[in-house]
Amino acid sequence: MRFQLLGPLALADGPDVVVLQPSKPVILLAALLLHANSTVSAEYLQRAVWGEDQPATARAALQTCVLRLRRLFTKHGVTGTSIEAVPGGYRITAGPPTLDLLGFRDQVRRASALAGDPEAELYTLKDALSLWQGSLLANVRSDVLHRDEVPRLSEERLRAVERVCDLLLGLGRCGEALVDLWTATRVYPGHERFHEQLIEALYRTGRQSQALAEYRRVKSFLLDELGVDPSPSLRKLELSILRGEDLGGGGAVRAAVEPAPALVSASDPGAASRVIQGAAVPLPAAAPGAGPAFPGAGPAFPAVPHFTGRAAEAAAMAARLTAPPPPDADGQRPLTVLVSGAPGIGKSALAQHVAHLVRDSFPAGRLLVRMTRADGHPRTADEAAAEVAAALGPGRAGERALLVLDDVVDADQVRPLLGERHDLAVVVTSRMGLGGLIATHGGWVHRLTAFTETESYALLLAALGTERVEAEPLAARQLAALCGHFPAALRILTARLLTRPGLRLGDAVDWLGDDPLARLTLTDSPDHSVSGLFDRALGRLDPRLSETFLRIGAGPPELLREAEAGAEADVVDEVPDGTRNHPPVPEDVLEQLADAGFLEDGPPGPYRIHDLLRAHLRRTVRIRDRRTEKV
């Protein structure tokens, strides 16, 4: 039998857990366990149970509580732990195997002894933190314990979380650190070290503007609520971000989503870029022999963390981008490679990965430009062209630059950038097919679909580790199938599983299978969710097109085939009152949906809808119908 104190007070016997009902004996048990293996005075126990205003019979009532507690132990089969009456008070004996608080402290001590091995220290600390099960002593109604003991225990946990985030940042695993840091900074807004770590992690994952916005938010909170300025370390961090310095302790990583524009010269390891309001502006060249503009400045296109799959596409893109131009290529438009596909299919990750692979072939530098703002509105072609011109400059003879235009909305955004310079290779990512761009400017097209089973399994291996995945290979494959082998869903799933290292993959299958759409969400970062991704994508569609797609997707699978046949035959469904329920969908509408990435190539038929997207459409329609019924 094990006592669980790091959450609601409970008794656990293997997988069976009994959360104790609030009562005075439960307060007594909590007070004793908080000071396990030590004598706790009767006066302190009385104060914990009844507060500062104790009844005259408090000492006798305390003895009654002890008797009731012993009966509770007998009822639940607690035999290895007893409550001893000792001179001056009472004592309960426990050890790490029987009390989670002692187990946590023991693991933290062991982690400290592993300071020379960051991976081992990180694993041990995460194991320790997994013992925390929710709101501390939620079922213990004692003002004294919540005033005097809970803050001390919370501080122990915060120190462990802070150390975990330090280790993750030191190992270059900034994306993992963000999962904990978003929650920590919101729950503990006055804890400056968490804010410092969050800002660093955001910056090192390519989200410079978000990092600076977070700094401004923290500064405003400290001034308004506490009347103090940010700490010197926070101010120094802001200055480093404004200068574009490399903060990588163990090698910075950049997330595969929402990268900020950045420029790096492959031929000059000292080149750096300054980030000013989201635009990349090259720094003045350092004097000969002066060394890099900023010590440790790193590449703008590092390897994408845990990048797996897409081997054929990556190899083909790299070969085309690095192939020597034909002899008569002077005056031709730049080589263009288009990566298209559904939202969340991994277009940006593939483009970044390839840009990293071909870095040595572009000595004039590589520039990443987001063509859509964070609010979903497209940037104008003039804005993007001005940014490219400022970042790349006039160019040098015989040297090419690589331009990655990420999340392009339509061909008109891109055309001005493809007609002005001939020393560029361009990678365009877009949810749209951009057939008009290919028709007028040429280029190669890679349209991405969901992962294969092998690629999904490889991603789980890379993200969760071989030991965890290969211990339950069948469960791992079932999780991938529940995600529909959809890259964005798999990324969100692995992020959730990494924060719950004690959760067996087999149990995760049941947990995810209950409601995949609800579970494929990062609760502390709601923007990272499959439903949110689809909602934002649908929001970009023309409302009439979106409504048609909702009707097709929320209906039975046969409806899509009926829609395909609608141009040739007037196929509709009959409902009980004899009215026609589903008018045919014109073929040009289906083509528009396919071009926007919402319809995949069959089988069956020319088109199909991904299972996760279909589930989202059905849920959206159900919610809307319920709201309509209420009105």
Image: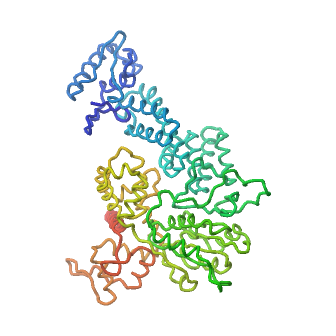
Q: Is residue 98 visible?
A: yes
* Figure colour scheme: rainbow
Q: Where is residue 242 in the image (x, y as percent from the top left)?
A: 68, 53
Say above or below: 564 vs 397: below
Q: Residue at x 32, y 59 (%)?
A: 477
Task: List the single residue furthest toward the top.
Answer: 87
Residue 153 versus residue 341: which sits nearer the camera?
341
Q: How many tags in the picture?
A: 0
Say above or below: 127 vs 413: above
Q: Residue at x 51, y 66 (%)?
A: 348
Q: Residue at x 41, y 54 (%)?
A: 494
Residue 608 versus residue 61: which sits nearer the camera?
608
Q: Position of residue 206 (x, y in %)?
A: 58, 57
Q: Where is residue 555 in the image (x, y as percent from the top left)?
A: 29, 73
Q: Can residue 155 be seen in this view?
A: no
Q: State which quadrant residue 484 falls in.
A: bottom left
Q: Position of residue 31 (x, y in %)?
A: 37, 23
In which quadrant is the C terminus drawn? bottom left
Say above or below: 80 vs 320: above
Left of 271 or right of it: where is 603?
left
Left of 569 or right of it: where is 266?
right
Residue 367 versus residue 496: which sits nearer the camera?
367
Residue 568 versus residue 505: which sits nearer the camera?
505
In which quadrant is the N terminus drawn? top left
Task: List the single residue furthest toward the bottom.
Answer: 568
